Image (cartoon, coloured by chain):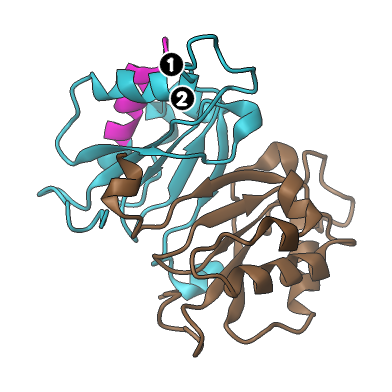
Chain colours: A cyan, B brown
Amino acid sequence: MTDIQDSASGDGPATQLLVCVKCRRGRDMPPDGRRPGQALYERIRALELRPGISVAPVECLQNCDHGCTVALRGGDDKWTYVFANVDEADHPQMILDGAARYHATSDGLIPWRERPEHFKRNCVARIPPMTLPEEALND
Amino acid sequence: MTDIQDSASGDGPATQLLVCVKCRRGRDMPPDGRRPGQALYERIRALELRPGISVAPVECLQNCDHGCTVALRGGDDKWTYVFANVDEADHPQMILDGAARYHATSDGLIPWRERPEHFKRNCVARIPPMTLPEEALND
């Protein structure tokens, strides 16, 4: 099983970077059949990962009109984020830098000034932590 | 704490319907200051909820350009879904019907033919289950 808690590093629950590998970025399939999402995943995997961060391919995050798409999650105490319009050539290192900043937080909220510009402009959704206090949800 | 597992009904983990109550649907604030997202939340809460389904307000799901926005989650074994373009007047019952269909699944995947039309056309993202087998993620 992929249990983020189980693979936690010493400094908190592990961060999982999910990459939609089926993404065609709204286009017809390229002649060689290699999807932009798969290329994005492979390029990210070829880079050095910080401790506590893992990368997982996912078959469709269903943000098909605005791909490529990645998501960041990190256990029950953190917001989960989904980012769109990721470019497989230009953005792999930026995504990993953002993942490292996400990993360094306790709640998933990267301080605005530290947030990659792409994250600021291309967040399509976020999901609250599982452990958000009931009072905060139902104030 | 809001732990979906803790509030599980007899037929599986509870389903949580998250409603973005801060949504202005990309418009200026209405003169009375009542946001469409807050109105959506209140109208959903006024309807009868099926057993096992709870509704929680959330301050910003960050799908601001395509609100109103709701999300469905239901424990570690289910996909989490985010749906956009929800109308506070027309859609509350449809959202609850969709939530009931989601609740009836084991993995969050509502069969396509049973899926509300709005869900088919307005899914902005989905997040895989926490317990998705590693093999499925890394095939």
Tell me, yes or no, whether the highlighted magenta stretch contains residue A91. Answer: yes
For the stretch drawn in magenta, what is the main secondary structure? helix
- Please provide the residue range marked out in magenta: A88-101
Q: Secondary structure at mark 1?
A: loop
Determine the chain carrying the residue at label 2.
A
Place of residue B73 in the rendered image (x, y in percent of width and height, measured from the top left): 53, 64
Mark 1 or 2, nearer chain start: 2
Tell me, yes or no, whether the highlighted magenta stretch contains residue A113. Answer: no
Q: Is residue B92 above or below residue B67?
A: below
Residue pictured at 82% horizontal, 46% vertical: B29
Q: A8 or A138, which is in the foreground? A: A8
A105 horizontally vs A25: left or right: left
Q: Which residue is mark 2?
A: A37
Place of residue B53 in the rendered image (x, y in percent of width and height, measured from the top left): 60, 78
Please rate how many residues cluster around mark 2, counting C-alpha atoms within 10 Å: few if below 14, some from 14 to 19, many from 20.
many
Please rate how many residues cluster around mark 1, counting C-alpha atoms within 10 Å: few if below 14, some from 14 to 19, many from 20.
some
- Residue at the far left: name it: A10
Place of residue A32 in the rendered image (x, y in percent of width and height, measured from the top left): 48, 10
Residue type, mark 1 in image: Glu
Residue type, mark 2 in image: Gly
B17 horizontally vs B4: left or right: right
Q: Is residue A89 above or below residue B68?
A: above
Q: Which residue is mark 1?
A: A88
Residues marked 1 and 2 touching at CB (< 8 Å): yes
B123 horizontally vs B94: left or right: left
Residue pictured at 46% horizontal, 43% vertical: A81
Q: CA distance from mark 1 to mark 2?
A: 7 Å
Which corner quadrant holds the C terminus of chain A?
Answer: bottom right
Place of residue B66 in the rendered image (x, y in percent of width and height, measured from the top left): 73, 40
Q: Secondary structure at mark 2?
A: helix
Q: A136 or B44, which is in the foreground? A: B44
